[in-house]
Image: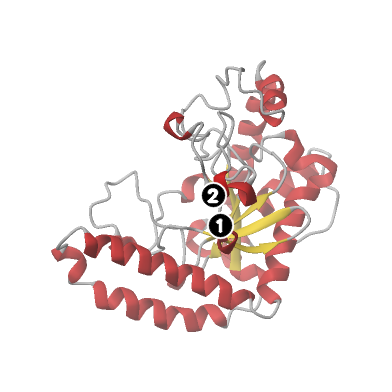
Amino acid sequence: MYKKRYGDIAPTQQRFEALKNHYRKLRDDFRAHPRALLELEAWKNKDENFEYRLLNGNQKSFIPPTLVGKESYNGAIRGKTDTFFSEYEKHNHPDLILSESNHSYIIGNLASYDSRQYPEAPAGKRPEGQGFAHSLVIPKARVYNVVDPAATANGCALLREMQAHFISFWQQHGGKAKLLARAKRAVDDQDAKLLSHGSRPVYETVRDDVFHHYESTKLDFSNLVAPGDFLFGFHVFPDNSIGHLHMHVFPHADGFRAFSTREHDYKTVPLEAILEVEEEDGNGGGGGDA
């Protein structure tokens, strides 16, 4: 049952069914909106003159206006319709890409997974990851969110590919090491940032334990063997923070989430729930194991 597989992030089968219903409602609401398909087409065509009242209505799905027209990595110019994940290879250093398939990239969360490294972050705006070595799988194509029909087309082929990509990467030689190195880099970067801004008494009292926790947890992380040890989840529009489809992946057991945020759990819909909904609604396609 779902409780056995995913623990506290979805403690009951009833909660799993609630997440399915939540996804179905948000998907149907989006697709029924009179502007949805029109805006999706304009965004995918990079129409900079279009007014994206739905897709960017929260003013956070696309890059901030202050970055439009500015250079990113390797001199690429950011456009009005860009998000932080769109055309990822064009705007980011290749070292940030942990793995690449024909259809997707795997990247590590740039934020540390450890909440103790964000001592001044207010409730409701926790920046840390949802679990140890939190990573993301993002499609190369412009797909806005899991409510975008392109995400679930052809029996959810893209979503299945994204999951299969991570599983293959995880199981291949060097995959675990890359994920651990990215997680450690995030911890180190946040540590350096805190120290560079002067004394942080609250952080300094736990700093040694932050690094000790990483070292002890990475051993348990390296011993994970089954895809079922991970949660593959999505933040469904309008609960998304970036207007480009991305799948959150992190180990779901409590030990890997001891110092990670739980603030996003309510809106994290597991891939398994989405696949079940799509199958029930006649778009299953078969196969896959979330």
- The label shown at residue 103 is none
- Name the element at disc 2: helix
Q: Looking at the picture, tell me which residue is in the foreground, 188 or 238.
A: 188
Residue 290 visible in the snapshot: no
x, y (%) of residue 135?
55, 61
Quadrant of res 207: bottom left
x, y (%) of residue 9?
50, 57
Residue at x 76% of width, y 37% of height: 150
Q: Mark 1 = which residue?
A: 93
Residue at x 84% of width, y 39% of height: 282
Contact between marks 1 and 2 (CB within 8 A): the answer is yes
Label 2 CA crowd tier, 10 Å (few <14, some 14–19, many 20+): few
Quadrant of res 144: top right
Left or right? Give the position of 90 relative to 180. right
Residue at x 52% of width, y 34% of height: 61
For the C terminus, which image quadrant?
Answer: bottom right
Q: Looking at the picture, tell me which residue is in the foreground, 261 or 96.
A: 96
Residue 134 visible in the snapshot: yes
* Lower sequence index among marks 1 and 2: 2
Q: Looking at the picture, tell me which residue is in the foreground, 236 or 58.
A: 58
x, y (%) of residue 235?
55, 44
- The label shown at residue 73 is 2
Residue sticking out furthest to the front? 75
Left or right? Give the position of 159 relative to 116. right
Label 1 CA crowd tier, 10 Å (few <14, some 14–19, many 20+): few
